[in-house]
Image (spheres, grey):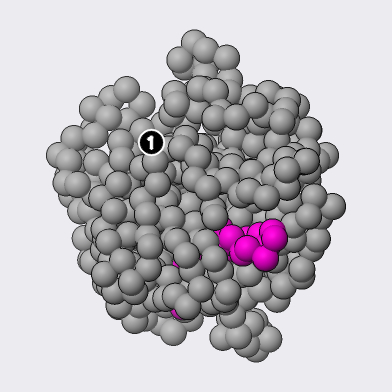
Amino acid sequence: MSINLKFCSGVGSVTGANFLLTLSDGTKTTKILVDCGLIQGEKVAQAENREEFGYVASEIDMLFITHAHLDHVGRIPKLVKEGFNGKIYSTPETMALAALILEDAVGLLEKEAKNEGVLPLYEIQDMRKAFTLWQTISYHSETSFPEGFSIYLRDAGHILGSAMIQFTYENKKIVFTGDLGNTPTPLLKDTEAITGADYVIMESVYGDRNHEPKDERRKKLELAIKASIDRQGTLVIPAFSLERTQVILYELNKLVETKVIPNIPVYVDSPLATKITDIYKGSTALFNERAQGEIRGGDDIFNFPHLSFTVSGDASRSIDHAKSPKIIIAGSGMSVGGRVLHHEELYLPDPKNTILLVGYQTLGSVGRHLLDGAKKVSIHGKEIKVRAKIETILGYSSHKDSDHLLEFAATAQDTAKRIFVAMGEPKASLFLAQKIRDNLGLDALYPERNVDYELK
């Protein structure tokens, strides 16, 4: 009997999660993938995504998905295109969200490919075939497979439907965390503890730094809005369509209802975010008790006066003619595509305006350049001067920070033989691995890409 683990991507980088777990009992070998995401940077999809996988797609028996973010699901259609014909498993919410995310990705990838004069990474028929292979598994239900292993899903608290996947094989428990939520979150339940794990593959996006205290995030949002109003400017919030937009709407609802901020126009300029918000509205059983209580009390937590969801291109362009002050929430969250680029191109040159960054900004993205204090950025082939105020609120990140990642790792302290620290920039992953070794006395490893690790 042997268990081998290979980090095909998702190590040395925050994006592109793709891990291969190989189980062998001496007579039969089972190849299992966990996540199959896009590697992202200055574009929606980096050229690296066109390279061959670190395995033969047709030899993969099954694929398990931790959650529906593009950097965890974005190469599934490519896997199918190259011959994968096994089963795909996730929570029901992840499947529903992934359908929207991947349909949107097809359009973005086609546009990028056309601009670069190459064929798209995959096409709509590849995406549709993937969903003929997809099945769902709920949280907290032990599911056994004929290949001799079982899985158990726990709530990761990261986005709606996000799951930690525990594999049990020959009495060994291997946990893939996916991304871990920044508990407590405004909407979702807390990240669950892991127990009895022998091996843990965990994220490290913020492995080397901490967020501001959670009770400060709404105050910082309030102050950013009020300052923008005082300047009669426009506040642009680049936000991921999935989770971040819904959290910001929830917070704005609170600020408006309690009359902490004036009632100014707020635009959610994203067809994708509009559809995802509808899924959130139908999935309130997965919200935390506080949010559920507010809904039971009659509060429409994603709605308030002067909120508009703009779907059509004409409606999006009409925002430019609306009088300031106003707030625009648009994707993508890292400014690597989507409608937010148009707004940044328009509003960055004016010092009355504010760009508010509320999430991780990957290397090479426009968002990262703004975060790092760039005076000029390139948008749509144009050099745009940065005169607008750039604000950051890390507390709205949907990822745990360094101290809370350590707290999470401690839940496996009694049993873990090794913790693999991945899904982070090298500096963050290495820092967290050392922190786990120093503080918990655990064997924590920053793994190499495409190297086989035997889980003894």
Q: Residue at x 28, y 25 (%)?
A: 382
How many C-alpha atoms fall within 10 Å of the one at disc 1: few (<14), some, or many (≥20)? many
Q: Quadrant of the C terminus?
A: bottom right
Q: Visible in this render: residue 335?
A: no
Residue carrying label 1: 41
* Position of 63 relative to 161 (above/below): above
Element carrying mark 1 = loop
280 sits left or right of 373 in the view: right
Q: Visible in this render: residue 197?
A: yes
Q: Residue at x 41, y 82 (%)?
A: 259
Q: Residue at x 69, y 59 (%)?
A: 169
Q: Does the segment drawn in magenta span residue 169? A: yes
229 sits left or right of 70 in the view: left
State the residue in front, 290 or 129.
Answer: 129
In the rendered image, residue 180, in percent from the top left (x then y), is placed at: 48, 64
430 sits left or right of 143 in the view: left
Q: Residue at x 77, y 41 (%)?
A: 28
State the residue in front, 27 or 184.
Answer: 27
Tell me the kind of residue under disc 1: Gly
* Position of 43 relative to 445 (above/below): above
* Position of 380 relative to 433 (above/below): above
Q: Which residues are magenta?
A: 163-184
Q: Does the segment drawn in magenta span residue 343? A: no
